[in-house]
């Protein structure tokens, strides 16, 4: 797979998260932790450096090398592409306004969950996530499903 350079910061984030989800176990524990904190928790290199007692440059270098390794794994193995999870593909085929509506619902859901110290009953969360996932999996009108 020829990995295309992301055009926006959002595409970069999605690309890094997908690669980390698939190949993260192939990184060192330190690289994996720095990557998760930076990309999933949205911490800056300086914040991570303070937390681990290292320099900002050390965190930057670790994340840079980890991302390069993840991209190398994808070039060699192509698992993200094989799963149809390429960040530059319009996987769901949803119109921009529908994608935006789902993104806003996911943002609201994340905020609601993060505001709760402990979630006793997760039924509402599972229902909401199922509905959003179903919305992402809808086949757009006027298109053919790919042959698998």
Image (cartoon, grey):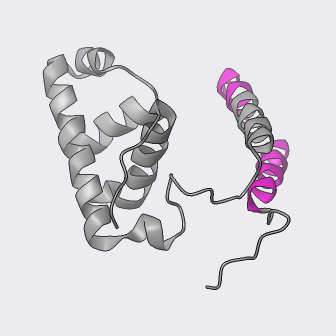
Across and down, in percent, residue 44 comes to 35, 19
Q: Specify whether 51 is left or right of 117.
A: left
Q: Is residue 54 visible?
A: no
Res. 91 image quadrant: bottom right
Outermost bottom residue: 148
Q: Residue at x 28, y 54 (%)?
A: 70
- Residue 41 spot, x, y in % from top left: 46, 29
Q: Nearer the viewer, residue 122 or 143?
A: 143
Q: Using the image, determine if residue 4 lies above or below residue 73.
A: above
Q: Quadrant of residue 54?
A: top left
Magenta-colored stretch includes residue 101 = no
- Which residue is located at x 21 percent, y 53 percent? 69
The answer to if 116 sits in the magenta stretch is yes
Could you say which is closer to the camera, residue 138 or residue 61?
Answer: 138
Asked if 89 appears above or below 108 in the picture, the reply is below
Q: Residue furthest front?
A: 142
Decide whether the magenta segment is chiefly helix, strand or loop.
Answer: helix
Give coordinates of residue 136: x percent, y percent: 74, 55
Which contiguous range is marked in magenta?
110-137
């Amino acid at each position: 797979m020829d990995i295309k350079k992301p055009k926006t910061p959002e595409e970069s984030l999605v690309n890094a998260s997908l690669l980390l989800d698939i190949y993260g176990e192939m990184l060192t524990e330190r690289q994996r932790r720095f990557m998760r904190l930076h990309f999933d928790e949205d911490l800056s290199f300086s914040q991570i450096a303070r937390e681990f007692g290292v320099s900002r440059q050390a965190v930057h270098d670790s994340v840079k090398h980890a991302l390069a390794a993840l991209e190398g794994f994808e070039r060699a193995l192509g698992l993200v592409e094989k799963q149809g999870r390429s960040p530059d593909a319009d996987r769901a085929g949803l119109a921009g306004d529908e994608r935006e509506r789902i993104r806003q619902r996911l943002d609201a859901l994340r905020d609601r969950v993060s505001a709760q110290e402990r979630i006793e009953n997760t039924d509402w969360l599972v229902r909401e996530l199922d509905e959003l996932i179903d919305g992402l999996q809808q086949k757009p009108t006027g298109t053919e499903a790919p042959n698998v």
